[in-house]
Image (cartoon, rainbow, N blue to C red):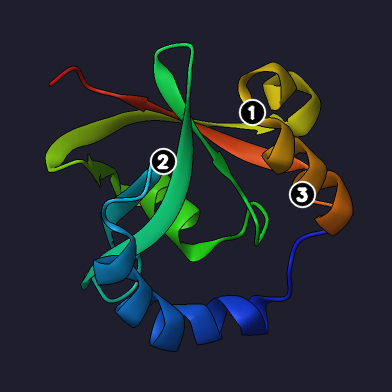
């Protein structure tokens, strides 16, 4: 069960705008930059990622229909973390049971509490 889309809309319009500058120095913090599928407008989505098998695992809190994921799948995008920008060259949705060994215990616990089942594995170009 993913969080309701209404929360995603609120976060996109309100929360993300003030959290991004505050969270830039937090471990695991990253920004996915992408273009809107319909508008073509540049977008940025603050997320947390976890290293795994040469890529990043990102919890799909809003499910597989998250706008950022759909935008990246449709038109590509990039990840910025620690001042380094890398193009996203692959996106794969995986079940939490596959990702479990690569996740911190607190994240595994939260996935169970919130009923989140899917993660995205982002394959990035080498810097």
Q: Is residue 30 above or below residue 99?
A: below
Q: Residues within 10 Å of mark 1 (few under 14, many from 20)?
A: some
In front: 75, or 67? 67
Q: Which mark is residue 46?
A: none
The C terminus sits in image quarter: top left
Q: Position of residue 124 (x, y in %)?
A: 30, 25
Q: Position of residue 109 (x, y in %)?
A: 81, 42
Question: Residue at the spot x=36%, y=49% of the render?
Answer: 26
Q: Position of residue 60 (x, y in %)?
A: 62, 50
Q: Residues within 10 Å of mark 2 (few under 14, many from 20)?
A: some
In front: 31, or 122? 31
Choose the circle earlier in sequence order: 3 or 1: 1
Is residue 36 at least partly visible in the picture? Answer: no
Badge 1 is on which residue?
A: 103
Badge 2 is on which residue?
A: 28
18 relative to 107 in the view: left or right: left
The N terminus sits in image quarter: bottom right
- Label 1 SS: loop
| Labels 2 and 1 touching (C-beta < 8 A) | no
In front: 82, or 4? 82
- Label 2 SS: loop
Q: Is residue 26 above or below residue 6?
A: above
Q: Residues within 10 Å of mark 3 (few under 14, many from 20)?
A: few
| Labels 3 and 1 touching (C-beta < 8 A) | no
Disc 3 to disc 1, how far (Cα)?
11 Å
Question: Residue at the spot x=76%, y=36% of the render?
Answer: 108
Choose the circle earlier in sequence order: 3 or 2: 2
Q: Which mark is residue 110?
A: 3
| Labels 3 and 2 touching (C-beta < 8 A) | no
76 relative to 27 in the view: left or right: left
Is residue 78 at least partly visible in the picture? Answer: yes
Q: Is residue 22 above or below residue 80?
A: below
């Amino acid at each position: 069960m993913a969080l309701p889309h209404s929360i995603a809309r609120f976060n996109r319009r309100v929360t993300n705008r003030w959290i991004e500058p505050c969270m830039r120095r937090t471990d695991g913090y990253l920004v996915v930059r992408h273009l809107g599928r319909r508008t073509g407008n540049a977008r940025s989505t603050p997320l947390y990622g976890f290293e795994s098998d040469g890529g990043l695992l990102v919890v799909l809190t809003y499910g597989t229909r998250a706008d950022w994921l759909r935008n990246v799948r449709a038109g590509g995008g990039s990840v910025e973390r620690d001042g380094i920008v890398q193009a996203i060259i692959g996106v794969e949705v995986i079940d939490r049971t596959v990702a479990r060994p690569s996740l911190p215990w607190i994240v595994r616990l939260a996935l169970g509490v919130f009923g989140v089942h899917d993660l995205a594995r982002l394959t990035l170009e080498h810097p």
